[in-house]
Amino acid sequence: MSEEYSVEIVNPEKSFLSKDDVTEVVVPAFEGEIGILKDHISIISFLKPGIIKIFSKSGEESFYVNDGIIEFKNNNLSILTSLILNLKDIDKEKISKIQKSAEEELSKSEINDQEKYLLDQKLEVLNSIN
Amino acid sequence: MASLDDLKKRISSVKSTQKITKAMKMVAAAKLRRAQESAEKGRPYSDKMNNIILNLLNSISDIENAPKLLSGTGEDKVHLCVVMTSDRGLCGGFNTNIIKKAKQYFQKVLDKGKNLKIITVGTKGYDQLKRLYGDNIIERISFKDSKNVNYFDADRVGKIVIEKFEKKEFDVCTIFYNQFKNVITQIPQEQQIIPLNTSEKDENSSEDNYEFEPEEDEILSNLLPKNISTQIFKAMLENSASEQGSRMSAMDNATRNAGEMVDKLTIEYNRSRQAAITKELIEIISGAESL
């Protein structure tokens, strides 16, 4: 029996990526990373800033996401996100731009704990890839 | 009758107008294709978002304690209308149609003695509404600087709306935009986004049991603000496709009208030229006869 399932990543502008031969996807869910294999139970969860790793027959790919929501059902994984970047063709400039706006956001006083947590996460991830 | 020179000038000025409208039509056609493409590409996102929300709603046990964005404030006093129009003119009835639709709604709201607040997106809407409803407009937004419709602009509008909702500045929010059907038909739409309209609940929803991480309510309260931005983004995409389509057909009409005008003027020009020649001939002949 094959161990593959399909994944689709969409952002508001377009369908970003669609693959049928995925063996495992690791997503940065809000309460920690989740690895999803074939025949996972149906799940809905949302993402914090982090790295999505997609393992497939053709190799491994990594993407940075800002936020998002995932739905897994009948061996179909949908990932909705407002900002996604392929780590392969990401440039330093873009990263530092996001970093800067996150820092600015963080320095504002009227943010709540959850926002602060998300922004901290974001900076941590950005630092690790920079 | 206008002199030959005047006619000549008019013909050439109509011709140059025709050139402009023709160029605008061509530009609009090219932009339309792009806008249409991005409207189509944007659909999966909003569809999926909708689906997930519907699935979530199915598994939520107590709808009463659901986030306010979903169930509303329980009151119906202040209506917020987000009127989305274009930043540029010369696009036929595009803006007028939205405004007309919006005005009907405004009248209904005001007749019931409720409060009305307006946010205009795009400068043309503000221009048309400021005279009658100037006091009701609480915010005006324009994306003149951004070339293409992008999600972050929509997110900005969404955040403004949510912020106002959290400050309890309104109870019901409706957006107005043109839905793109085809190049000649655009349908003005009103869509209520707060509280969320869940009447279409039974379509597409599945009986599946989902695992949620974290809890349903928490996901929902995170997802709903995103959904509002998504709906606004969808409206903006539809709007931009409609705008280009509407401009294209308006400019097509203008080009045709200019062509007709040139034809008419040319006939008039030729007639008066002939009349002038005939007059001269008569003068010569009668001059020769009198000798």
Image (cartoon, grey):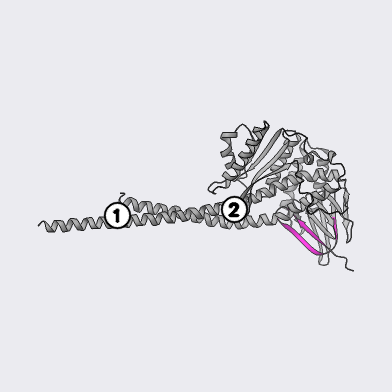
- Name the kind of residue labelled 1 in the image: Ser
Q: Is residue A13 magenta?
A: yes
**The residue stretch that appears in magenta:** A6-26
What secondary structure prevails in the magenta region?
Answer: strand
The residue nearer to you, when weighing B12 against A106, is B12
Instruction: Report which quarter residue A3 is drawn in.
Output: bottom right
Q: Earlier in the sequence, mark 1 or mark 2?
A: 2
Residue A130, visible in the rendered structure: no
Dot 2 corresponds to which residue?
B185
Q: What chain does badge 2 belong to?
A: B
Residue B272: mark: 1
Please identify the residue farthest to the bottom as the structure is shown.
A1
Q: Amino acid at mark 2?
A: Thr
How far from the left and from the top, in percent, is residue A10?
75, 56
**Left or right placement of residue B272 versus residue A96 in this view:** left
Relative to A65, does residue A103 appear above or below in the rendering?
above
